[in-house]
């Protein structure tokens, strides 16, 4: 990717009616790692996240808690959703709430535009509605209830009864966009990814599109339809617009032109909203469609999708309180191929923490800095000799950095981490084979020891830069201990696409001591 190009990435905006679980954290971390990489590459980067606070589900939950919906939303955002970003070290540029005036103003302007151009008209609708999904359901999306819901039709996702609703609503003429959407998917194969998601969306659209009910009149918690205030805008139609209202739609044309279009990260359960309804809305309004819609997989616990209602939800703090935020970030991007479902287990997390983070990366950093301190009085030596093994490390660093950047470009952060980790593994092997502790005992091997220590220190420099989007806290500590800032500047200002260029850490750099980046976790804490 050419440096300086706009990279606007979004997460879904989450319903704040419940507390966050690690599925939400997974999405936030993936978007953050991609944004941090592009930001450090010099791209014009913007990361948006936020909360979706309108709709019947929010109203009912607030009422059940003896609060008004705005008061309830304020409390949840303050106590749960903003703290999630801090817990996981998310460096978002904006946080949008659908109750903000900038959003509600933009929604009203957008729907008025579609109404004025004839893409919205009145009609009657009857159908099965799932409050959990905030969506009308086809009968094919319903199953027979069991237990206390036996004899009722329930949503296949939420396992709760649907409601048969009949309303006089306003409809978006989405059926008119079937051919244009299919042409979009054909002309831009990367518009919906991964390929399995693209195939699903194309099959759905080929089966035929109906017009979409986009207003409700049975409750009033939402954005009022500007030409008929008896109605409010359907919560999904409202929520999707956050991606443009946050960057100046109907208010700041320069910022909007600078940022749009976006890359949307979504869970596969909300793929159709983003890959079908949303581009149809934009086409109707005469706006560019998104750059890409990428659907990641589900996190599974005990074989089931993460869900608070099914008691499979795990709070991110349950992980970070023991392992730290860096381990959370690393684990979910390392262990799960992005775009596929992945199973979470405490045993796998603990094993990877110990083997890969503590013993692999952390021990490597501590050993190298300790040996520079012990054998060269804390000063990185000049590598006057470069043997075959040294040159091989240089090539591994160069190739891994290029491969990682290409992986980020194709939305494969798991492959990027795997590519970078080859440097960790190869540097550990290099030290084992070169045995600097043995070289230090032989005065005649002083030149060789210099080369080994300089190579290892430069490898750590590259790792600190390349891994900083993934494990920012550990890399900041390593950068400080390397003493790199006086000569090279702050870590986050290092051009990440040049991280594989060899020879950036100057000879004569004075290193410091490094506490364990990933301390040993006692067995009692793991079993607590």
Image: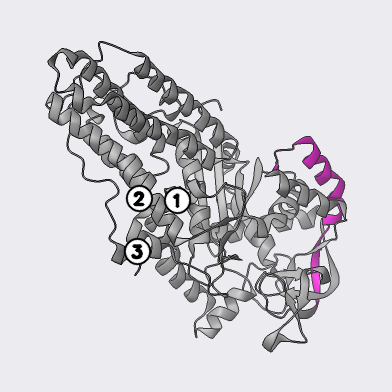
The mark that comes first in sequence, 2 or 1, is: 1
**Farthest residue in the bottom direction?**
148
x 48%, y 34%: residue: 419
Nearer to us: label 2 or label 1: 2
Q: Secondary structure at mark 1?
A: helix
Q: Quadrant of residue 241?
A: bottom right
Q: Quadrant of residue 493?
A: top left
x 35%, y 41%: residue: 360
**In the image: residue 288, left or right of residue 405:** right
The mark that comes first in sequence, 2 or 3, is: 2
Label disc, if present, on residue 331 of the rendered structure: 1
x 24%, y 35%: residue: 367
Please determine whether, in this image, residue 431 is positioned above or below residue 123. Answer: above
The mark that comes first in sequence, 3 or 1, is: 1
Label disc, if present, on residue 354 of the rendered structure: 2
Of residues 56 and 345, which is closer to you in this image? Answer: 345
- Residue 269 seen in render: yes
**In the image: residue 259, left or right of residue 370:** right
Residue 412's spot in the image, x, y percent?
57, 40
Please determine whether, in this image, residue 37 is positioned above or below residue 301. Answer: above
Residue 30's spot in the image, x, y percent?
51, 48
**What's the magenta region?**
166-192
Q: Is residue 173 magenta?
A: yes
x 54%, y 85%: residue: 64
- Quarter of the image with the C terminus is bottom left
Residue at mark 3? 526
**Total labels drawn:** 3
Residue 381's spot in the image, x, y percent?
20, 19
Q: Quadrant of residue 191?
A: top right
Label 1 neighbour load within 10 Å: few <14, some 14-19, many 20+: many
Please determine whether, in this image, residue 514 is positioned above or below residue 130. Answer: above
């Amino acid at each position: 990717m050419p440096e300086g190009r706009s990279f606007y990435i979004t997460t879904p905006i989450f319903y704040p009616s419940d507390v966050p679980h690690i599925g939400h954290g997974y999405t936030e971390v993936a978007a953050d790692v991609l944004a941090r990489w592009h930001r450090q590459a010099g791209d014009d980067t913007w990361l948006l996240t936020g909360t979706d606070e309108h709709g019947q589900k929010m109203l009912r939950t607030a009422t059940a808690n003896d609060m008004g919906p705005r008061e309830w939303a304020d409390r949840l955002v303050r106590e749960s959703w903003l703290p999630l970003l801090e817990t996981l070290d998310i460096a978002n540029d904006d946080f949008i709430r659908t109750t903000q005036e900038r959003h509600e103003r933009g929604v009203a302007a957008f729907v008025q535009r579609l109404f004025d151009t004839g893409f919205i008209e009145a009609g009657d609708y009857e159908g099965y509605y799932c409050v959990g999904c905030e969506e009308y359901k086809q009968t094919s999306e319903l199953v027979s209830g069991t237990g206390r819901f036996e004899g009722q039709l329930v949503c296949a996702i939420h396992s709760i009864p649907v409601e048969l609703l009949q309303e006089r609503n306003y409809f978006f003429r989405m059926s008119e966009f079937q051919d244009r959407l299919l042409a979009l998917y054909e002309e831009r194969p990367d518009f919906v990814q991964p390929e399995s998601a693209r195939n699903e969306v194309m099959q759905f659209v080929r089966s035929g599109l109906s017009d979409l009910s986009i207003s409700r009149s049975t409750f009033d918690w939402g954005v009022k339809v500007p030409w008929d205030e008896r109605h409010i805008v359907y919560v999904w139609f409202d929520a999707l617009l956050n991606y443009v209202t946050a960057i100046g739609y109907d208010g700041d044309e320069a910022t909007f032109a600078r940022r749009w279009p976006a890359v949307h990260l979504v869970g596969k359960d909300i793929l159709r909203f983003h890959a079908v309804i949303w581009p149809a809305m934009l086409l109707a309004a005469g706006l560019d469609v998104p750059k890409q819609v990428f659907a990641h997989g589900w996190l599974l616990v005990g074989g089931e999708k993460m869900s608070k209602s099914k008691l499979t939800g795990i709070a991110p703090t349950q992980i970070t309180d023991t392992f730290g935020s860096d381990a959370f970030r690393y684990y979910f991007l390392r262990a799960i191929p992005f775009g596929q479902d992945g199973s979470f287990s405490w045993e796998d997390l603990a094993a990877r923490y110990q083997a890969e983070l503590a013993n692999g990366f952390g021990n490597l950093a501590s050993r190298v800095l300790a040996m520079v301190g012990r054998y060269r009085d804390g000063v990185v030596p000049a590598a006057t000799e470069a043997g075959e093994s040294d040159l091989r490390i240089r090539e591994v660093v160069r190739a891994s950095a290029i491969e990682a950047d290409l992986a980020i470009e194709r939305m494969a952060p798991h492959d990027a981490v795997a590519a970078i980790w080859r440097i960790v593994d190869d540097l550990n092997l290099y030290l084992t084979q070169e045995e600097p502790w043995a070289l230090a005992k032989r005065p005649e091997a002083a030149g060789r020891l210099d080369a080994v220590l300089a190579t290892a220190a430069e490898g750590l420099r590259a790792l600190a830069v390349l891994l900083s989007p993934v494990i920012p806290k550990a890399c900041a500590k390593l950068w400080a201990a390397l003493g790199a800032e006086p000569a090279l500047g702050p870590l986050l200002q290092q051009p990440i696409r040049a991280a594989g260029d060899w020879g950036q850490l100057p000879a004569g750099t004075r290193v410091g001591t490094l506490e364990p980046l990933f301390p040993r976790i006692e067995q009692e804490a793991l079993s607590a």
